[in-house]
Image (tube, rainbow, N blue to C red):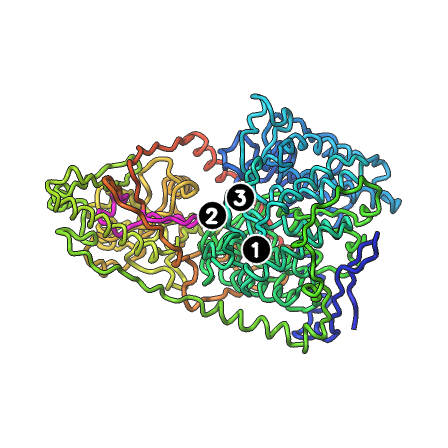
């Protein structure tokens, strides 16, 4: 038997005591030291691939764009909204990566990186940044780098020239963030101008009224560390004041906090409460502030919150948001991926059982989709399909392995490594997943990927002798930056007395499991496995077919919504009589609008309202039946499967989700391009995949014409210039209102931008082969024809898990009801000419497209030159990359 102790160096009071049975690590086959060494080395190689590509192609920009091999500079790239608030033209990725370099034993690279930061980085840019992101990434990165520099200097071998330069930069940045705290509540504004602060027209900020709970409550570690490193208490005072205010504003009956709060009045703007996005690191910093600073008040507050979380939010293995005033009432039916940090926090708390259960649920979802989707439903379907390479799941895996030494978690880590290499690795780094269902990429590699992911994976597989310093002497911030526990002994200004009330007094008996004896927690060595097996079974069987319910009939209108066809003159006349008109939008869609006063009679007006109501019900029904997106993967020279285009499916023809191999063939442009008549180049189309332009006729008609010509598949390209899957909802092609069983080939839809990439490739190389499938196939196997890439896929397992049922799409999201009055609108696609098609937005909850008093939609502005340059740049990169790959193959 052995003991793991977490203790505070100032008070020597024991925080956690995990007495782990020695035979616990024998639950499964233990991993050999040689295998762990291979995986550790693989982590280092993957880090080198990401870091070197950032330095070669992006530095001094804030982040790397791995698909186009260039840096992301704010203002030069199209705005991504709030996501860009993390970018401040201060070489974000380099600063965020400083202490990762030391942890991975790259001290020479660390010393060079510090010199670059001191020489090149400016913090006085006239730019508005997120207070939260700048604090955890930049201030935390500078403090973590300073901690590592001091530690290395003390060893006498490295950084002997260092004179606290990073600390001076950190204080400069802290002073630039302080104006954000100039509010009556003490809660910071969400944004601040690094040069001009908050007030005045030059700042271009300071008008916001709301901030998220995590944004205001995730300051204390960095600000307190800055105060204690520099001896200036002002930073810690402001961070404590913000935490105190959030504590005072908690809901006193449930002891929960909301997601968004007014920074002036303290009123909760969003009253849903969970442990994921918007709140997550607030709870994390309460517990870690106790560990770092030794103030019992933080632990008391955390324990009170934690008891409420376990009472209301935790429904093992699920963690579901609730309303703070009615905590027994669920606030949503889905979970976001940020809650994956919570099992790791539970390990620090000492509550291992629910940590095992929730982590296992997350692992099973990961195995279904290769990555954790940004959000997934309670029956484990995709709700939001993106995955920006978040590290929270790896973080919890590391902490659970640290607490249990169960080799099962080493295998979980191996899965994370394999999936990153197989699905996210690209020639210029690692690309975020745009859609986990299709394997399509986003041109994005966030700084937290280098700051966090590789730290936790390296520590998971490293032995104690692999580390140059004792990690137990440090606390990880939410960005995984390392702050020394010795800061607790540094003299600091006394904390103001807390305003405690009788309801805040702790009953210690409620928390006697804080330091559990695992002889009771793990009654036998198989205990963790017994917790995991039922969860694995529950996730595997979680694909129920949603029942479709209709309200009892309200009478039959003269025209049924399901029978309506927009190209039928009789139907249009019936709509006119009912006061329903069609509005043609610029993007090719049509809106149905009902004005009761324009109907020919009161009875006709009532029929019109019933028709619109039926259309709403049909929309709601079809939203539950949406098909997931498909993939068009360019597999021929010089792409070799590395280019995956997100495509929309058809509600007819071959179901690619039921095809193991997909449909593979060379593409050719149909003549006529619209595909609305018999093809004049049928002989050339035969045996190929036909490219068609959207418009002029029904999708099913296009499919029948290319089938007659002998095509094996079809790709319809949008004619709306500038459209892109980056900005538009997924498009799903409907039938023509007739039986489409005669269509037996697959038909996919590409927006203009993605279609143009395919057309440019065809123009450049003439013979282009693509794979039409439900998701991207393994790229490495395509590139190397079975040969492993040296140093890339060390011992990686290439098994592909097949699912018996399609669990990839959220089919259970509730559709909000709409109230009809004098004017109603229904939006549909003109090409379908029938209400069978709905635009699907995988990233959001989208109800039926019904509006009141519709406003004209604006045509999106598109920079045609930059789009063309982007395609040409990609072509050049691929050609250069191919030469490198061919050279590597010659050396094998």
Q: CA distance from mark 3 to mark 1?
A: 14 Å
Residue nearest the observer in this picture, 787 or 869: 869
Mark 2 to mark 1 CA distance (whole Å) = 50 Å
Considering depth in this image, is 330 or 224 the residue closer to the camera?
330
In this figure, which residue is indicated by the disc labeled 1?
254
The question of residue 834 being in magenta is answered with yes
For label 2, count other residues whose C-alpha is less than 10 Å away and answer few (under 14), some (14-19) or many (20+). Answer: many
Q: Which mark is residue 268?
A: 3
For residue 39, above or below residue 216: below
Label 3 to label 2, Cα distance in Å?
45 Å
- Measured as percent of width and height from the top left, residue 631 is found at 41, 52
Question: Residue at position x 40%, y 32% from top?
Answer: 862
Q: Is residue 688 visible?
A: no
Q: Main secondary structure of the magenta part?
A: loop
For the point 20% across and 50% down, which residue is it? 610
Say if residue 495 shows up in the picture.
yes
SS label for mark 1: loop
Using the rendered view, name the quadrant where residue 741 is placed: bottom left
Indicate left or right for 845 with 402 as reference: left
Of labels 2 and 1, the one closer to you: 1
Q: Tag 2 or tag 3, which sits nearer the N-term?
A: 3
Sequence order check: which comes first, mark 3 or mark 1? 1
- Find the residue positioned furthest to the right: 156
Residue at the image position 84 percent from the left and 34 percent from the top? 163
Pointer 1 local density, CA inside 10 Å: few below 14, some 14–19, many at least 20 = many
Residue wearing tag 2: 643
Q: Which residues are magenta?
A: 826-848
Q: Quadrant of residue 84?
A: top right
Question: Measured from the top left, where is residue 154 in percent x and y?
Answer: 87, 45
Most extreme residue toward the top, as rendered?
A: 201
């Amino acid at each position: 038997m052995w003991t793991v102790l977490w203790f505070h160096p100032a008070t020597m009071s024991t925080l956690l005591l995990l007495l782990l049975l020695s035979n616990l690590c024998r639950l499964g086959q233990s991993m050999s030291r040689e295998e762990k060494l291979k995986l550790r080395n693989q982590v280092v190689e993957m880090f080198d691939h990401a870091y070197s590509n950032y330095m070669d192609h992006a530095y001094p920009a804030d982040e790397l764009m791995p698909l186009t091999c260039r840096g992301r500079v704010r203002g030069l790239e199209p705005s991504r909204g709030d996501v860009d608030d993390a970018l401040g033209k201060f070489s974000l990725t380099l600063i965020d990566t400083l202490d990762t370099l030391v942890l991975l034993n790259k001290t020479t690279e660390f010393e060079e990186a510090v010199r670059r930061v001191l020489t090149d980085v400016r913090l006085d840019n006239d730019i508005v940044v997120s207070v939260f992101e700048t604090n955890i990434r930049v201030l935390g990165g500078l403090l973590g780098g300073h901690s590592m520099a001091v530690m290395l200097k003390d060893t006498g071998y490295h950084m002997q020239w260092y004179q606290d330069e990073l600390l001076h930069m950190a204080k400069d940045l802290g002073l630039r963030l302080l104006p954000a705290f100039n509010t009556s509540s003490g809660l910071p504004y969400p944004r601040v101008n690094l040069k001009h602060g908050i007030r005045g027209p030059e700042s271009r900020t300071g008008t916001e009224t709301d901030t998220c709970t995590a944004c205001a409550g995730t300051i204390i570690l960095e600000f307190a560390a800055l105060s204690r490193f520099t001896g200036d208490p002002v930073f810690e005072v402001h961070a404590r004041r913000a935490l105190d205010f959030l504590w005072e504003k908690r809901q006193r009956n449930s002891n929960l906090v909301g997601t968004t709060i007014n920074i002036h009045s303290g009123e909760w703007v969003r009253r849903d409460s969970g442990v994921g996005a918007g709140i997550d690191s607030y709870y994390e910093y309460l517990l870690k502030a106790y560990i770092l600073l030794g103030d019992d008040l933080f632990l008391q507050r955390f324990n009170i919150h934690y008891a409420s979380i376990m009472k209301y939010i935790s429904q093992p293995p699920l963690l579901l948001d609730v309303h703070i005033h009615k905590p027994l009432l669920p606030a949503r039916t889905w979970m976001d991926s940020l809650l994956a940090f919570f099992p790791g926090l539970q390990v620090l708390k000492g509550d291992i059982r629910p940590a095992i259960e929730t982590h296992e649920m997350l692992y099973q979802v990961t195995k279904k989709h290769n990555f954790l989707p940004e959000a997934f439903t309670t029956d484990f379907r995709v709700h939001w399909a993106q995955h920006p390479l978040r590290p929270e799941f790896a973080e919890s895996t590391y902490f659970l392995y640290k607490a249990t030494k169960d080799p099962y978690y080493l295998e979980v880590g191996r899965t994370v490594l394999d999936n990153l290499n197989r699905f996210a690795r690209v020639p210029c780094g690692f690309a975020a997943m745009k859609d986990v269902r299709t394997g399509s990429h986003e041109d994005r590699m966030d700084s937290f990927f280098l700051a966090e992911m590789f730290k936790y994976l390296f520590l998971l597989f490293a032995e104690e002798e692999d580390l140059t310093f004792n990690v137990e002497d440090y606390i990880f911030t939410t960005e995984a930056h390392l702050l020394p526990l010795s800061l607790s002994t540094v003299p600091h200004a006394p904390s103001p007395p807390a305003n405690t009330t009788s309801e805040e007094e702790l009953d210690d008996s409620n928390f006697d499991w804080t330091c559990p004896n695992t002889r009771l927690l793990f009654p036998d060595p198989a205990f963790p496995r017994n917790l995991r097996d039922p969860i694995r079974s529950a996730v595997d069987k979680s694909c129920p077919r949603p029942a479709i319910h209709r309200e009892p009939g309200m009478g039959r209108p003269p025209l049924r919504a399901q029978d309506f066809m927009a190209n039928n003159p009789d139907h249009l006349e019936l709509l006119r009589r009912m006061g329903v008109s069609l509005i043609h939008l610029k993007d090719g869609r049509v809106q149905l609008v009902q004005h009761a006063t324009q109907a020919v009679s009161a009875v006709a007006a009532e029929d019109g309202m019933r028709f619109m109501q039926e259309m709403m019900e049909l929309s709601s029904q079809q939203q539950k039946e949406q098909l997931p997106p498909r993939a068009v993967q360019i597999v021929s020279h010089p792409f070799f499967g590395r280019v995956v285009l997100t495509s929309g499916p058809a509600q007819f023809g071959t179901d690619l989700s039921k095809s193991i191999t997909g449909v593979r063939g060379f593409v050719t442009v149909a003549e006529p391009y619209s595909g609305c008549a018999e093809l004049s180049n049928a002989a050339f189309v035969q045996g190929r995949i036909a490219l068609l332009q959207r418009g002029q006729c029904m999708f099913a008609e296009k499919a029948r014409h290319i089938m007659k010509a002998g095509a094996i598949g079809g790709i319809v390209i949008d004619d709306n210039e500038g459209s892109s899957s980056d900005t538009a909802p997924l498009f799903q092609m409907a039938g023509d209102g007739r039986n489409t069983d005669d269509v037996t080939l697959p038909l996919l839809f590409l927006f203009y931008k993605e279609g143009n990439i395919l057309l440019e490739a065809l123009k450049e190389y003439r013979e282009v082969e693509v794979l039409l499938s439900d998701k991207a196939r393994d790229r490495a196997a395509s590139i190397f024809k079975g040969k492993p890439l040296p140093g890339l896929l060390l011992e990686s397992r290439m098994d592909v898990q097949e699912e018996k049922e399609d669990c990839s799409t959220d089919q259970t999201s509730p559709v909000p009801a709409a109230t009809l009055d004098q004017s109603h609108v229904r939006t549909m696609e003109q090409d379908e000419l029938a209400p069978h098609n709905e635009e699907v937005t995988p990233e959001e909850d989208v109800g039926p497209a019904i509006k009141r008093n519709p406003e004209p939609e604006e045509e999106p502005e598109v920079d045609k030159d930059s789009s063309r340059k982007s395609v040409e740049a990609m072509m050049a990169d691929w050609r250069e990359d191919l030469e490198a790959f061919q050279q590597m193959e010659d050396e094998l």
